[in-house]
Image (cartoon, rainbow, N blue to C red):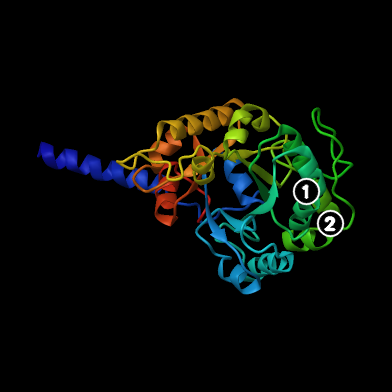
C-alpha cells in the first residue's frame, strides 16, 4: 500500500513538472526579435546555421531554433541572397511563437582587429542591416575601438547619446527594405533599430567573437563596450591562435590553455552582463545553463531539453 501511494505521488509530481514545462499555446509576441524577448525573460536561446536565398529562407521559416546564424564570414558575401532569404522567412512565416520571422544574426568578413579596419569597412555591416536582419556577430573582436565603431554603425545619428560611443552612422534610406521585413513603418523602424540592451526598446542583438589570443588579451575591454549583448570564445579559431589546432588532449579533453581562454571570456561576459555563447549537447545542456551559458549551439535535441529544463513558455 505504501509503495503504491509513493508511486502515485511520483506520477503526480512528474505530471505537474511536465505540465509546467509545456509551451503556452496562447502566447503573444512582445517584440520583433524573439531572441531578445527570451533573453529579456531570463530564458536561454538556441540557434542554427543558415545561408542561401529566398527558397532557403522560406524553408527555414519554421525552424526549431530561436535564431538563425547567417554565415557570410567565409561564405559568399551576397546581400541580394540575404535580402531574398529574409523575404523567404516572411513569406514562409509566421513562427510557432507568432513572430513574423525567427531572428537572424549575420557573421561578416569584416573583423574587429582595429579601428582603421572597422571604419573602412563598416558599410558591410550596414548592408547587412539594410537587408532586415536582427543583429550582427563581429568576428575576431580584438580592439575596443573597433567594437565601438561596430556599434556606432548600427545606430542612427539621432539615437539617444551614450557615454563611450560616438554619433550613429546609419543613414536615411537604410530603413526602407528592412522595415518591410520587420512588418512596421519606416518611422517605427528607425526608433527600434538600435542595440539592446543599450536601448531597452532596441531590436538589434550585437555580439562578439573573442576568438584569438589578441582578442583574449582585451576580453574585458571589448566586452565592456556599450551596445554589446553577447559574446563567445570561438574554440576553433582560439585553438589555432594558441597553436593548438585541435585544442584537445589525448582523451579529447580541452587543453588547459583552452580552458583558461574559455574561463576568461565567460568571466568577461558575467562582469559586463553579456550572454555567453557555447556549444551545448543533450548530456550537458542543463549543466551549461547552470554555469551561465545563455546562447547554445548544438542541435534541436539539446535545445528542447534545455527549454524543458528552464520551463520555457514561448512555443517552439
Rendered residue at 45%/31% (across/down): 257
Query: For the residue labelled by badge 2, is the local secondary structure a helix, a strand or a loop?
Result: loop
115 to 315, vertically: above or below: above
259 to 97, vertically: above or below: above
Q: Which residue is mark 1?
A: 193
Check disc 1: other Cα within 10 Å, few if <14, some if 14-19, many if 20+: many
Q: Is residue 1 left or right of residue 274?
A: left
Lower sequence index among marks 2 and 1: 2
Residue 148, quarter of picture: top right
Q: Give coordinates of residue 311: x percent, y percent.
A: 44, 43
Depth order, front residue of 118/172: 118
User: Residue lying furthest bottom in this view?
Assistant: 55
Q: Give coordinates of residue 221: x percent, y percent.
A: 67, 28
**Residues at discs 2 and 1 in contact (Cβ within 8 Å):** yes
Q: Is residue 84 left or right of residue 268?
A: right
Rendered residue at 56%/57% (across/down): 97
Q: Which residue is mark 2?
A: 174
Residue 114, quarter of picture: top right
97 to 192, vertically: above or below: below
Determine which of the numbered discs, if any, sits on residue 239 in the image.
Answer: none
Measure how far apart labels 2 and 1 are at the Cα level: 10 Å
Query: For the residue labelled by badge 1, is the local secondary structure a helix, a strand or a loop?
Result: loop
Residue 199 is at least partly visible in this image:
no
Amino acid at each position: 500500500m505504501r509503495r503504491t501511494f509513493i508511486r502515485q505521488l511520483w506520477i503526480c509530481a512528474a505530471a505537474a513538472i511536465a505540465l509546467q514545462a509545456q509551451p503556452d499555446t496562447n502566447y503573444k509576441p512582445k517584440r520583433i526579435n524573439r531572441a531578445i524577448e527570451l533573453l529579456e525573460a531570463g530564458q536561454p536561446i538556441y540557434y542554427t546555421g543558415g545561408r542561401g536565398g529566398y527558397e532557403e529562407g522560406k524553408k527555414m521559416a519554421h525552424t526549431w531554433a530561436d535564431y538563425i546564424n547567417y554565415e557570410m564570414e567565409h561564405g559568399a558575401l551576397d546581400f541580394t541572397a540575404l535580402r531574398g532569404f529574409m523575404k523567404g522567412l516572411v513569406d514562409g512565416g509566421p513562427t510557432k511563437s507568432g513572430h513574423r520571422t525567427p531572428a537572424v544574426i549575420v557573421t561578416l568578413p569584416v573583423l574587429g582587429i582595429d579601428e582603421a579596419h572597422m571604419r573602412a569597412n563598416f558599410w558591410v555591416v550596414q548592408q547587412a542591416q539594410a537587408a532586415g536582419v536582427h543583429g550582427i556577430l563581429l568576428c575576431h573582436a580584438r580592439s575596443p575601438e573597433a567594437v565601438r565603431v561596430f556599434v556606432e554603425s548600427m545606430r542612427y545619428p539621432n539615437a539617444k547619446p551614450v557615454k563611450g560611443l560616438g554619433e550613429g552612422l546609419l543613414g536615411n534610406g537604410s530603413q526602407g527594405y528592412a522595415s518591410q521585413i520587420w512588418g512596421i513603418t519606416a518611422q517605427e523602424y528607425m526608433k527600434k533599430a538600435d542595440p539592446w540592451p543599450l536601448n531597452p526598446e532596441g531590436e538589434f542583438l550585437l555580439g562578439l567573437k573573442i576568438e584569438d589570443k589578441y582578442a583574449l588579451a582585451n576580453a574585458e575591454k571589448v566586452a565592456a563596450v556599450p551596445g554589446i549583448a553577447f559574446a563567445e570564445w570561438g574554440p576553433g579559431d582560439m585553438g589555432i591562435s594558441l597553436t593548438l589546432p585541435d585544442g584537445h588532449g589525448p582523451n579529447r579533453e580541452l587543453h588547459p590553455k583552452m580552458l583558461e581562454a574559455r574561463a576568461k571570456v565567460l568571466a568577461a561576459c558575467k562582469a559586463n552582463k553579456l550572454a555567453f555563447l557555447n556549444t551545448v549537447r543533450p548530456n550537458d545542456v542543463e549543466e551549461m545553463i547552470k554555469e551561465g551559458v545563455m546562447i547554445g549551439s548544438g542541435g534541436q535535441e539539446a535545445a528542447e531539453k534545455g527549454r524543458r529544463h528552464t520551463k520555457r513558455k514561448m512555443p517552439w
